[in-house]
Amino acid sequence: MATTLLLKHIAVPGIKSLDVYRNMGGYASVEKALRTLTPNQVTEEVKKSGLRGRGGAGFPTGMKWGFLAKPEGVPRYLVCNADESEPGTFKDRYLMEHIPHALIEGMITSSYALGARKSYIYIRGEYFYVSRILQHAIDEAYAAGWLGENILGSGFSHDCYVQVGAGAYICGEETALLESLEGKRGNPRIKPPFPAVAGLWGCPTVVNNVETIAAVCPIITMGGEAYSKIGIGKSTGTKLISASGHINKPGVYEIELGLPVEEFIFSDAYCGGIRNGRKLKAVVAGGSSVPILPAELILKTAQGEPRLMSYESLAEGGFQTGTMLGSGGFIVMDDQTSIVKNLLTFARFYHHESCGQCSPCREGTGWMEKLISKFLSGTAHESDVDLLWDIQSKIEGKTICPLGEAAAWPVAAAIRHFKSEFLELARNKSYVEINHYKRLQPVS
Amino acid sequence: MSAEVHGTQKFDATKRTQIVFSASAMALVQKLISNYPKGKEKSALIPVLHIAQAEFGGWLSPEVMDYVASVLQIKPVEVFEVASFYTMFHLKPVGKCVLEVCQTSSCWLNGAEDIVHYIEKKLGIKVGETTPDGMFTLKVAECLGSCGTAPMLQCGASYHENLTYTKVDQILEQYASEGRPRYYTDLDYTNTL
């Protein structure tokens, strides 16, 4: 049986409640940290664990914590990024909905390490019902003394709040999230200063993803070194993967990093293969922003090595032949899928979600959407592929925040690996919308 | 924002006086404000706008936004610039039930467009339109984080997932008989949001 840490007790009835969660060993990391470790020792354990940000960037969490400025007399904040909006990603929702205390426990232990008296969980507005589940868990934690004044008699006090957003992908970018938390438009800030120095209300702030914060619990409980032995190489620990698209068993899976991609897609323990007996065409492995790969490159690297679910293996070959682990939003497409139409849904998404601050992104995302639409409406010329390539190359790296890259990369990758599909649509004006609903109905 | 919406309501003094949070909503607003340090009351703006939208007819009129500004003691423009930025806030009147069908990648792969066409045919309206009885507004939405349970639609505070045509029929019937969706303010919310 594969190692599971975050979802180990997912099947236990009542795991949503504090009592059951506690009976299954919950809040052990708070006990261990507050009773036996100094805040710096907690941070050291996280550093030793090799934990990398699970929101998508993969930045070492311990190092991020290490950057936190600690001026005297200035409050510090921990902010949890629960603004999960990357298309293909729904793991944080699953974790918060089913095991909310895993996040609350992580918030307390992490806040102790950072010296944060208050923390905020910023959750996307559409997940309103999940915010209620979290609030209920927080209330339970207060009643049991895990939150509030002088927790476990340690002298450490902590308050945790939930705030809902109102529908803006950009608020998953950490500085936009802080703006939104301050009651403003979600326009990303120019960095530096980084949030570690000037974050929420100008105070030193750490912003971490839900899964990252939840992973702190097993790290502290088992020790950073033991955690670092799970996984492969610099991809330590486990990762929640949101699997969707044309697979038999969509859902959230906790995998030990290093699992072969082929096993993940085809094993009954995970995705269970392609639906309705179709063939695998392509995969977006880490959320809509990461490059799409055709079947042959997602299963094996260009060198013919088996591709693994790890930060390094998925990135093997750079963007020419590789991709990224990203947020773990794993979208699988069968051989009847139009890559160009799928790309249009991404381009439309980024156009809709651009905050409008930087011209290359605000204008470029709209141009890309229009151009891609032309291929599908039969009005594109072959040269439009080159124009599309040109536009995406002029967005990347020219914006305040990474939404520019996020919008450009999927376009570049679709052209890189599926240029012939664009050209054929331009030549034959042949796009016909497939009724996916009808064709995916189970044969009875 | 369209001129006519602004124009017809801007000087309606009788309406203005009606715009006051109910006691329970006001208690919640005060609770939300207390979540933030003194002087940072503006941070409560987004949750308070959710409450306002649920309390005052499902959309945010200029009068409602002005009222929220007065409650949080900030300038009206600070409210408008936020309300106009976030997708979940409606600045024009909408139907009682706003059906938002997710259309991004995983949902499209699983037939979201066909679901949209089905609803359009069933309600006799196009995306962006409201039924003549004011019951349903149909919209398309970008990724709602329900990719593993695609296709899906959101209405009020509820997610409807793994949609089929039959399921859509049931959902529409249910809303038509109940008259409105569950709003954020309906949900047990002693100190939520």
Image (cartoon, grey):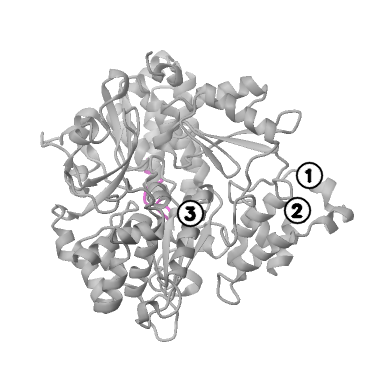
Classify A266 as above or below B1.
Answer: above
Taken as a whole, is the magenta stretch helix, strand or loop?
Answer: loop
The answer to the question of whether label 1 and label 2 lie on touching residues, with beta carbons closer than 8 A, is: yes
Q: For this rendering, which residue is in front, A304 or B14?
A: B14
Residue A286 figure quarter: top left
> What's the residue type where badge 3 is placed?
Ile
| Outermost residue to the bottom | A72
Q: Identify the secondary structure beneath mark 1.
A: helix
Q: What residue does disc 3 label?
A: A133
User: Mark 1: few, some, or many residues within 10 Å (few <14, many ≥20)?
Assistant: some
Distance between the alpha carbons at the discs numbered 3 and 1? 37 Å
Q: For this rendering, which residue is in front, A376 or B88?
A: B88
Task: Please give left or right for residue B47 compared with residue A41 in the image.
Answer: right
Task: Please give left or right for residue A247 compared with residue A375 in the image.
Answer: left
The part of the chain drawn in magenta is: A393-402
Q: What residue does disc 1 label?
A: B5
Q: For this rendering, which residue is in front, A4 or A395?
A: A4
